[in-house]
Image (cartoon, helix red, strand yellow):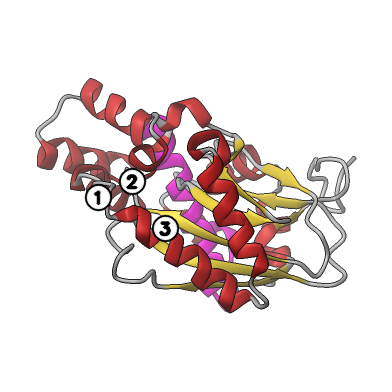
């Protein structure tokens, strides 16, 4: 199957997850801010009947969806799901390096996975999911999730700052400058950095750099009034527009033009 711009698409004409609902982010409470970047909700449109395409972002989330708590592992390719139209998904996004301490394993073991939280925590995860499900509104469900995680946070060490520094350096700089700064500031060898990144993010720094550059493209596309692909490629850190096109297709399954259209850019 191909789209009208000759982009190969997966069966069911997927749509970017951020384009099929109202996505909102909120700061975590004080008890969680050392462990989580944000809490979020995504209320899907009643007519959202297409496959949802979740693209890689370098992050790990705990999500509550259809009554179950699920860990969304780090992705290296688009992940497809079939959401219930009109439903609301809520979640919490780990800070870089935090997920392995909460889940008890390196993130390289769950790359591309969607794993029930009960696989890691057993009955307590099912009890938390039940409390969330008993709440009568999205706001109350988010408060129930945050309250449960805040109680657990007292027994979990915050992540070391090195992987947060690496993440933020690659988030703002393309591979060459960003990688050099990381190696110098952390005073580690490339091999040690690769091992630490695999534990924290599921993959090495080169893959993380590709994913965060792709996220820069998405953010620039959302912010640009009249985006031109050549300009976006330069600003995001790609060598040229052809490089942008290859990477966007590889990480999302869409062409850049399709991404712009779905984002309303």
- How crowded pointer 2 is (Cα within 10 Å; few <14, some 14-19, many 20+) is rated as many
- In what element is the residue under mark 1? loop
C-alpha gap between disc 1 and disc 2: 6 Å
Whether residue 207 is in magenta: the answer is yes
The reply, left or right, for residue 121 in relation to residue 46 is: left
Q: Which is nearer the eye, 159 or 197? A: 159
Q: Earlier in the sequence, mark 2 or mark 3?
A: 2
- Magenta residues, start to end: 203-231
- In the picture, the disc for residue 98 is 2
Q: CA distance from mark 1 to mark 3?
A: 13 Å
Task: Kindly report the distance in space between the C-alpha atoms of the residues bearing marks 2 and 3.
Answer: 13 Å
Which quadrant: the N terminus?
top right
The residue pinned by badge 1 equals: 158
Helix, strand or loop: magenta stretch: helix
User: Earlier along the polypeptide chain: callout 1 or callout 2?
Assistant: 2
Tell me whether the residue at label 1 lies in contact with that at label 2, contact meaning CB atoms closer than 8 angstroms: yes
Is 224 magenta? The answer is yes
Residue depicted at x 49% and y 54%: 215
Residue name at image x 40 percent, y 29 percent: 105
């Amino acid at each position: 199957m191909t789209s009208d711009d000759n982009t190969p698409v997966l069966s069911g004409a997927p749509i970017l997850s951020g384009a099929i609902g109202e996505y909102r982010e909120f700061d975590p409470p004080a008890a969680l801010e050392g462990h989580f970047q944000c809490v979020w909700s995504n209320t899907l449109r009643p007519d959202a009947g297409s496959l949802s395409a979740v693209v890689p972002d370098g992050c790990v989330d705990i999500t509550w969806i259809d009554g179950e708590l699920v860990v969304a592992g780090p992705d290296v390719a688009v992940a497809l799901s079939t959401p219930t139209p009109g439903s609301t998904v809520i979640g919490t996004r780990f800070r870089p390096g935090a997920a392995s301490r909460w889940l008890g394993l390196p993130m390289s073991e769950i790359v591309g996975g969607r794993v029930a939280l009960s696989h890691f925590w057993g009955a307590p995860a099912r009890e938390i999911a039940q409390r969330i499900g008993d709440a009568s509104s999205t706001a109350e469900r988010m408060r129930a999730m945050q309250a449960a995680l805040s109680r657990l946070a007292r027994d979990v060490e915050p992540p070391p700052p090195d992987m947060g520094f690496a993440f933020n350096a690659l988030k703002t700089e393309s591979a060459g400058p960003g990688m050099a700064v990381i190696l110098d500031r952390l005073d580690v060898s490339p091999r040690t950095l690769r091992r630490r990144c695999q534990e924290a993010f599921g993959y090495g720094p080169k893959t993380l750099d590709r994913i965060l550059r792709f996220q820069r493209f998405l953010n620039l596309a959302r912010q640009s009034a009249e985006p031109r692909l050549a300009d976006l490629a330069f600003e995001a850190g790609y060598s040229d527009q052809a490089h942008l096109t290859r990477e966007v297709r590889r990480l999302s399954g869409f062409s850049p033009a399709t991404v712009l259209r779905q984002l309303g850019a």
